[in-house]
């Protein structure tokens, strides 16, 4: 997790990796999420999941992304000058996430560019990488976020 200091656009740099936390995934939450948002048989039905290519119940990819989002908010965005995101460019579900897995997420800065039209902000292109307890990458999200620039009164205190 990051320190609780407020992060501005200027605090991000290419190659920066912020480990934003980890969480245990439970079967109850896998089934609850999928029942409401992605009720495919391999997410909610033990018998059907056992007969699927996955051999058992797995988390919805959207559930995995939601867990990643929570960790990124808790570890970076919540203590930042985030102004939202214009979107994501790539989401990959690489390995199934199962009950009992512990997901760890890293926020990796790929590109930093000040806005040419709005000098109060900049864009940070990032890769969110979720790994399981075995160190295997299970999902990645690439996207961009807009962050407010540091106020001039604080610029000398960075």
Image (cartoon, rainbow, N blue to C red):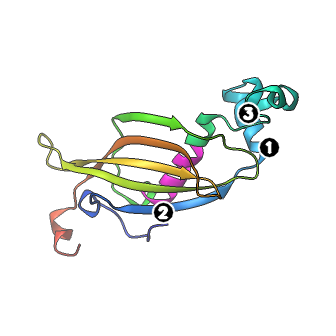
Label 2 packing within 10 angstroms: few (<14), some (14-19), many (20+): some
Q: Which of marks 1 and 2 is nearer the N terminus?
A: 2
In this rendering, the label closer to the viewer, 1 or 3: 3
Please give the label number shown on residue 54: 3
Label 3 packing within 10 angstroms: few (<14), some (14-19), many (20+): some
Quadrant into which the C terminus falls: bottom left
| Residue bearing mark 1 | 28
Q: Is the magenta stretch mostly helix, strand or loop?
A: helix
- Name the residue: 60% across, 59% down: 22
| Residue bearing mark 2 | 19
Query: Is residue 144 shown in magenta?
Result: no
> Residue 79: percent from the left, percent from the top?
42, 61
What residue range appears in magenta? 66-76
Residue at disc 2, secondary structure: strand
Query: Is residue 67 shown in magenta?
Result: yes
Report which quarter residue 24 is drawn in.
Answer: bottom right
């Amino acid at each position: 997790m990051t320190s609780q200091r407020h992060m501005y656009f200027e605090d991000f740099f290419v190659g920066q990796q912020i480990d934003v936390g980890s969480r245990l995934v439970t079967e109850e939450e896998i089934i609850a999420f999928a029942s409401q948002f992605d009720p495919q048989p391999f997410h909610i039905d033990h018998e059907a999941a056992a007969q699927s290519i996955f051999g058992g119940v797995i988390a919805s990819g959207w559930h995995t992304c939601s867990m990643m989002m929570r960790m990124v908010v808790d570890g970076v965005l919540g203590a930042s000058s985030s102004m939202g995101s214009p979107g994501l460019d790539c989401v990959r579900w690489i390995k199934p996430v199962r009950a009992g897995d512990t997901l760890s997420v890293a926020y990796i800065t790929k590109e930093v560019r000040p806005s040419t039209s709005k000098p109060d902000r900049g864009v940070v292109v990032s890769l969110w990488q979720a790994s399981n307890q075995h160190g295997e990458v299970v999902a990645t999200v690439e996207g961009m976020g807009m962050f407010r620039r540091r106020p001039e009164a604080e610029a000398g205190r960075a």
